[in-house]
Amino acid sequence: MKQEISSDSTFGAGRYDGLWLGYRPLAASALGDRLAGAALAVHVAGHDEVAQSARDELQRGLSALLDKPVTATADPDGARIVAGSADTAVPIPGVLGDPTSWPEEAFAMWSSDANAGDRIYLVGGSSQGLLYGVFALLREWQMGHWPEMQPALHAPRIAQRVLNHWDNWTPSATHGSVERGYAGDTLWKWDELPEKIDSRYADYARACASVGINGAVLNNVNSQVDFIRTENLPKVAALAGVLRRWGMRVYVAVRYDSPIVLGGLATADPEDPGVVEWWAGKIDELYGHIPDCGGLQVKGDSEGQPGPLCYGRNHAVGANMLARLLLPYGGMVHWRTFVYRIPGLSDDRLKHAYEVFQPLDGAFDENVMLQTKFGPLDFQVREPPSPLFGRMPRSNLGMEVQLAQEYTGTDKTCCWLAPQWREVLDFDTQALGTGSTIARVVDGTLFQRPHSLIAGVANTGDGPQWTGHDLAQANWYAFGRLAWDPGLALDQIAQEWTRLTFGADPLVGRTIPDLLLRSRAVFEKYTSPLGLGLMVERAVRRMAPAPAAREPWHRADTHGVGYDRTRSGSGFVDQYHAAVSDQFNDLATCPESLLLWFHHVPYSWCLKSGRPLIEALCDAYQEGVAEVESMVAQWAGLAGHIDPPRHARVQVRFQEQLAWARIWRDTCTRYFLTKA
Ligand code: GCW
């Protein structure tokens, strides 16, 4: 029996934004005509719920693009678009090999020539691959492309592509706030679940599936222990049921002392048999509700969260206990490496994660994933990449990035983070010689690891635009696209998002990608140029500059600025492989974008441009503001090309951004000039 999915997936009928899934009618064009001719009927084989989502999406998307209803037929011979998964009757060209041996998430599409009926074929390695193929086909059409006659296989490089929701579970079980969330409260209405399923859950999952995101940790890593109480698991299961139809698995963040708080035990020591038994029971219960649960996430011994160190055990012992219990269910442990200020560590916080975790390389079970922030500090606009990526060859290292703009201007700022993620992914750790990029560590190929993960701290909330700032939707989109293929060109991603979101207006298609592509560099210039690092106030909102309060970080004095992390300083450089550490260690070869992360530099030091440091710093702040001014003007120029409410909303945000940029420039230049 056909499940009614489309009815609960209509993007809120105006209640909230349709993201990049608006499927605007294609303008009159050769491609549109060809599509209209070819798309008399679609056939999508397969009966499971993911195949049904694929069928619904193709029908819904195509009908909208052609602005006329398209029918689905059970007869492949009567269809012009023929789709299915590996076990369907679609004739597969020999070059693709046996589809039953493809990765499950892979897909291929190709077209017959016009004389042979102008058909399009789409085959997935499973229903999930088929679903991704449908979204890819709809995207290609909107980008003005027709599938090639030569089929190619598309498969994701990273297996677990997961959003992390720092969504709080409130004791009253109403829907709660989002930690570092700037887009409203949590999407998950725990007070209504499991009875009432908000239509937004399916739309969320559709949006994720459309860019290949296949998992979500539903709750905050600063976990509330109540989340996994027996009476709450049906709520989690109901949400998992919606996400499952779109190929997404849910993961659950747990507090390490749950056996004490929920189980009434005296300890949460991972080597205590009673503790192991308690977790065994809880995990069994969880999988009873959610048989395909992705696993558990743990923030241990960090920022007030308890962990194995509290009970005298190291992180490997702590993680492996859970991993062994999860193994029979196929579950993973996503164990975070975000730890610092543990007694006995060195003074430089950047060294801490390495000091705790690197000695444990090889000690973690196969189904433990060490989830590591991209940089050694905490999601700054620019950081050197975490040295752990190159130094744990016998562990699964997953990378964590932050879509939520905690340190990158919150919802007041256009800051497209894909360039940052790309830089980190492209960074060469030199672990096994040249070409040992972080992308190859994260996708598991460099060290031949069995599992791979990229995690993004979500920027979603229940506000009407999903992500606060309309343009921040592009961070969600880009995360999925880069997670699928870390090598994808940034301008392609920016153009796709713009076209799918705003349609085919040429001015919009030039302007918005340009704004996105330079936005991160602009934010960096007027907040922390030359690798200054952490400059933002400590307050929850994290908007204002606080150069004086952040002196322990950037170490400005009357002679110079920057944190000496060279061999004669904190020694942080030596956590990298020699080729990298030598480069960072030398003031002459250290990239200028990272200069002050590694060196205490005299204000009179001449940069490559020939300018002394103090001048370059002040110029950067000036230039940053000038660039925001030009962004404001560029956006203003789109009036009449974008729907007026959205244009006005973003205009207001750009004005706010400009006001903040001026505050940053004035505060920081005054501060540095006074110091110097
Ligand atoms: O950057 C810090 C944030 C905390 C966050 C922590 C973490 C969820 O300010 O809000 O806690 O990182 O990543 O665990």
Image (cartoon, rainbow, N blue to C red):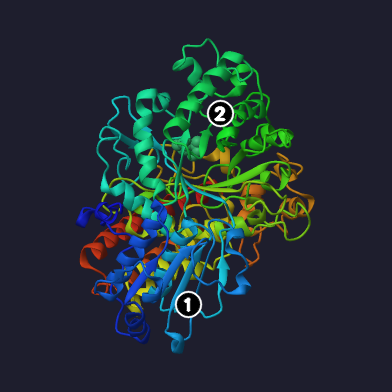
The kind of residue on which mark 1 rests is Pro
Q: Can you give x and y, in whole percent of width and height, for residue 557 in the image?
A: 59, 43
Q: Nearer the viewer, residue 385 or 503?
A: 503
Residue drawn 73% across and 45% down? 393
Q: Nearer the viewer, residue 570 or 259?
A: 259
| Residue at the top extreme, as displayed | 266
Q: State whether residue 600 appears in this view.
A: no
Q: In this view, does 271 lie above or below 240?
A: above
Badge 2: residue crowd in 10 Å (few <14, some 14–19, many ≥20): many
Residue drawn 48% across and 40% down? 292
Q: Can you give x and y, in whole percent of width and height, for residue 104 in the image?
A: 55, 56
- In this rendering, position of residue 292 left or right of residue 8: right
Q: In this view, does 185 lie above or below 595?
A: above
Tell me the SS state at disc 2: loop
Please give the residue where the numbered disc 1 appears in the rendered image.
Answer: 147
Please give the residue where the numbered disc 2 appears in the rendered image.
Answer: 300
The kind of residue on which mark 2 rests is Gly
Badge 1: residue crowd in 10 Å (few <14, some 14–19, many ≥20): some
Disc number lying in front (2 or 1): 1
Q: Can you give x and y, in whole percent of width and height, for residue 564 in the image?
A: 68, 44
